[in-house]
Image (cartoon, rainbow, N blue to C red):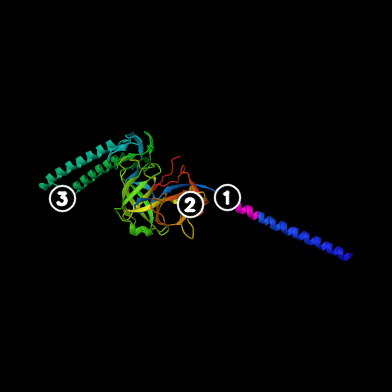
């Protein structure tokens, strides 16, 4: 009897184990089925992307840098001597000519002192003339004549010194340019060297920037440059390289470069931030794309082309095709493509992160990435 029970228990156990394994393997099979169905449906899902045709565009090889606008002549004007401001002959922000009087200090007794010194010099001249006549008849010694000449020279030197002192109380424009904001008022005591107003020559102007030492063979005085500023989007200012520094900076291993920029409309002001493009080499033509179209990776750079195909029912559809490319130089938002893309090829420029080779796509170009060779940030 015990053997029969043991056999029954063994049968029940084996049946239970069989059922358990059946449930496990059945669950796995069902799970795999549904995953396969999901992936099949996902693979056939149409992905929306933005695309544009690759075009061949003129390309001028350039070196790009950033710099600052600097005045050819710029100074903060001040008086050489101290005194009370007597008169101001300028307004803030106006243009002035070279030598124009801008400010005078109170003369005090300077004219009286000058008159006295001129009288002394005139008397010394009379005494010298009289003694020269007396010397001719041997009435005075030659030593007396030497003393008279020295006295006259000293008196005349004092006149010159007084005139120079009086001239220092007149502030003139050392060069033509545009004045800044006035810093002083009439009646104010002005110590020597106190800033009165800034004067900047605005046409032409310099742009100072730095280039890496590797660029030295490509840059020389006379080369053309193009300057853009975020203050004037869509505009550029032309100029030429004026000079390169005589030494490379040991900290950054870069060399300072100065270019002269035409500023006939006087839009550029010293201190402005500028983007500088230095033209190097002969112009060429390249197939260009927005840089957002390229997927960069360690095993190669690639893009997705939009190709035409048919679905299982024979209806036309657009299919993404993965293509590896060889890239060239970049400028602004653009990159040159040397191999892999031909002019006229339709290239995915946005949304490629969700693509793989053979994905069906739909094109929506309501929002396209920027494709400008000289982008400027929008003004807020």
Dot 1 corresponds to which residue?
Answer: 41
Give me the disc on residue 320.
2
Residue 39 placement, left or right of 177 = right
Q: Which residue is drawn at 86% across and 63% down?
A: 5
Looking at the image, tell me whether mark 2 or mark 3 is earlier in sequence order. 3
Residue 238 placement, left or right of 347 = left
Label 3 neighbour load within 10 Å: few <14, some 14-19, many 20+: few
Q: What element carries label 1?
A: helix
Foreground mark, 2 or 3, reads 2
Residue at the front extreme?
Answer: 313
Give me the disc on residue 142.
3
List x then y, in percent, for residue 42. 57, 50
Pointers 2 and 1 in contact (CB under 8 A)? no
Front-lying residue, 131 or 333: 333
Give me the disc on residue 82.
none
Q: What stretch is highlighted in magenta?
A: 31-38
Q: How far apart are marks 3 and 1 (CA)?
A: 124 Å
Label 1 neighbour load within 10 Å: few <14, some 14-19, many 20+: few
Front-lying residue, 208 or 30: 30
């Amino acid at each position: 009897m015990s053997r029969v029970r043991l056999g029954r228990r063994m049968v029940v156990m084996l049946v239970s184990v069989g059922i358990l394994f059946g449930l496990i393997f059945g669950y796995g099979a069902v799970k795999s089925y549904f995953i396969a169905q999901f992936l099949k449906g996902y693979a056939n899902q149409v992905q929306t992307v933005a695309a544009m045709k690759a075009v061949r565009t003129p390309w001028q090889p350039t070196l790009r840098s950033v710099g600052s606008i600097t005045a050819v002549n710029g100074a903060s004007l001040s008086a050489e001597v101290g005194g009370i401001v007597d008169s101001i002959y300028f307004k803030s922000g106006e243009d002035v000519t070279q030598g124009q009087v801008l400010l005078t200090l109170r003369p005090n007794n300077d004219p009286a002192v000058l008159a006295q010194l001129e009288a002394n010099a005139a008397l010394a001249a009379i005494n010298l003339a009289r003694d020269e006549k007396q010397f001719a008849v041997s009435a005075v010694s030659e030593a007396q004549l030497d003393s008279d000449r020295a006295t006259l020279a000293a008196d005349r030197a004092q006149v010159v010194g007084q005139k120079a002192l009086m001239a220092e109380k007149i502030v003139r424009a050392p060069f033509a340019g545009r004045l800044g904001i006035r810093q002083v008022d009439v009646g104010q005591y002005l110590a020597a060297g106190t800033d009165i107003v800034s004067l900047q020559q605005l046409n032409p102007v310099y742009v100072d920037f730095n280039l890496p030492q590797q660029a030295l063979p490509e840059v020389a005085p006379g080369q053309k440059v193009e300057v853009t500023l975020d203050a004037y989007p869509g505009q550029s200012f032309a100029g030429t390289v004026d000079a390169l520094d005589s030494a490379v900076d040991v900290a950054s291993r870069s060399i300072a470069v100065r270019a002269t920029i035409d500023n006939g409309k006087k839009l550029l002001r010293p201190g402005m931030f500028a983007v500088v493009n230095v033209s190097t080499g002969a112009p060429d033509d390249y197939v260009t794309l927005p840089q957002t179209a390229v997927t960069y990776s360690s095993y190669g750079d690639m893009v997705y082309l939009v190709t035409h195909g048919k679905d299982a029912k024979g209806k036309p559809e657009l299919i993404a095709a993965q293509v590896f490319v060889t890239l060239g130089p970049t400028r602004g938002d653009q990159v040159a493509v040397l191999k892999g893309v031909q002019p006229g090829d339709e290239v995915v420029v946005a949304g490629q992160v969700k693509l793989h080779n053979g994905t069906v796509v739909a094109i929506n170009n309501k929002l396209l990435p920027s494709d400008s060779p000289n982008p400027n940030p929008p003004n807020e």
